[in-house]
Amino acid sequence: MKQIYLDNAATTQVDSKVFLAMKPYFFKKYGNASEPHRMGQEARLAVEQAREKVADFLGVKQEEIIFTSGATESINLAHKGLIEALNFKNPHIITSSVEHKAVLETCKYLENKEIATVTYLPVNEYGLVNIQNLEKAITDQTVLVSIMYANNEVGTIQPIKEIGALLKKQDHKIYFHTDATQAIQYLDCSVDNLGVDLLSFSGHKIYAPKGVGALYIRKGTPLKSQMRGGGQEGGLRAGTENVPYLVGLGKAVEMIYDLRFKNDDSVKKLQSLLIEEVLKIPGVKLTGHPAERLPHIASFIVEGVEGESLVLLLSDKGISASTGSACTASDLVPSHVLSAMGIKAEDAHGSLRFSLGKDTTEQDIRSVVEVLPGIIDRLRRMAPKL
Amino acid sequence: MSKLFDALYSKDVIKHVRSPKNMGEMSNPDGVATVGNPVCGDVMRLYIKVDPKKDTIKDIKFQTLGCGAAIATSSIITTLAKGKTLEEAEKITDEGLAQALGGLPKVKMHCSVLAADGLKKAIQDYRLKKSA
């Protein structure tokens, strides 16, 4: 059966160009980048070239980029590392209630350990943070604001630029972190435009392998390593560099940069087609902001249907999609994002997310909208009338 | 596989989700029960028709709003209960259902509890109606 992969917000296929760039660093150029011999230097050169590509992509200096195992590690380092380095009495963090678990759990950890206090900003029905609310939440103790660039479940884009400008106006320095994991492929990530001091992202959402990512750290931002050892990555992230994966990340970033410059809006067009067609099904609503949304995420609430069974029956037709239903979570609580947006638990169970990628075709979308109504109908007929 | 990381559905679970057995509404059931609630994401309704002479389950049907495990456990319980005496049917446990499905991920065990509970309540409903 032909597989239609519409779960690119979860992870992407490694691009063949990325894989080919990585390949020599497994078998031939496998030296340790910390060694002075030729093999080592060859590896070092590759790592630094990858760093240059990521730095160029974000419009920053190479020394402002450190490599990690992915956004989760970048986020942990940015939050814990900053708070630890500041050594500030009673530091306060402002974040939002729709952040990825990597941010929320890190903030909860800092809270539970009584290392910091945290404000979790509410969002409106579209998942948007309100800037006035954010401004009101700022205190003399606020040292860090961490707001995601765009949401992974519903695709809503936060006003990062405006928040950056607001934070610059404050009397004391407030560091600004953004989780750009979902946004990185499609939105402007020049950190100076955004006004961020710290930016996290992963490789596996942009056609590089899982297990590699980066953290941008604006020069002068204090940060304490959370991983001690051989002093790699400027002492901020010890451990032998994962040379092939870093090469892959560099290649992937270069590739998505090229894609953006081609001004290719095909993903956006396919998303519009998908949303338009899916909304023709009775009892289906779009979640997230109608306009301020990432071009690759189309998320819905399907009334009278449970999301996981929907995903399983789609999978049976060769289609990979995702749900925020509690039934897929170990804690049996529905998506915190949908809950924060005011969506009732019984509706959140019927959430369905499609996320497109650079290789998604119109035929893929047509196939999905052809089978989806039948599957929804079947599940609705299976459900007892209440 | 390590139990801790076990999150896979067995082939049998998928089979039941794809083609559930005895699914649908039953008209004039002898016993019926609805368990679970939509806030938790799972609602099951079980209908039974009883052969009063033999005290056996002559026919059984289910309707479920829920995840794959909820659908599969409701489907399998109908196949296990059909033809059994009420007393035997009441003895079907959540572990028994999970076993019959080739195992269930740990986080999904509550779905099998729901199905076993639903059948017991449907039988209770039948007895109540009979004694009334």
Image (cartoon, coloured by chain):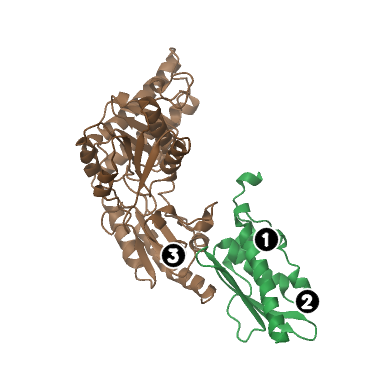
Mark 3 secondary-structure assignment? helix
- Left-right relation of B97 to A13: right
Label 2 sits on what residue type?
A: Thr
Whole-number angstrom distance, CA of label 2 to CA of label 3: 39 Å
Label annotation for residue B101: 1
Mark 1 secondary-structure assignment? loop
Residue of label 3: A347
Of the 4 image quadrants, the one containing the N terminus of chain B is top right
Find chain A in the image and tell me its colour.
Answer: brown
Label 1 sits on what residue type?
A: Leu
Q: Is residue A379 above or below residue A100?
A: below
Label 3 sits on what residue type?
A: Asp
Disc 2 crowd, CA 10 A, few/some/many (<14, 14-19, 20+): some
Q: Is residue A293 above or below residue A385?
A: above
The answer as to whether the residues below labels 2 and 3 share one chain is: no
Give percent across and percent down for residue A216.
33, 31
| Front one among A235 and A378 | A235
Q: Chain of mark 1?
A: B
Q: Chain of mark 3?
A: A
Whole-number angstrom distance, CA of label 1 to CA of label 3: 28 Å
Disc 1 crowd, CA 10 A, few/some/many (<14, 14-19, 20+): many
Give the residue displayed 41% in from the left and 17% down from the top. A41
Residue of label 2: B85
| Front one among A34 and A219 | A219
Say if residue A197 shows up in the picture: yes
Give the residue displayed 37% in from the left and 50% down from the top. A357
- Which chain does green denote in the image? B
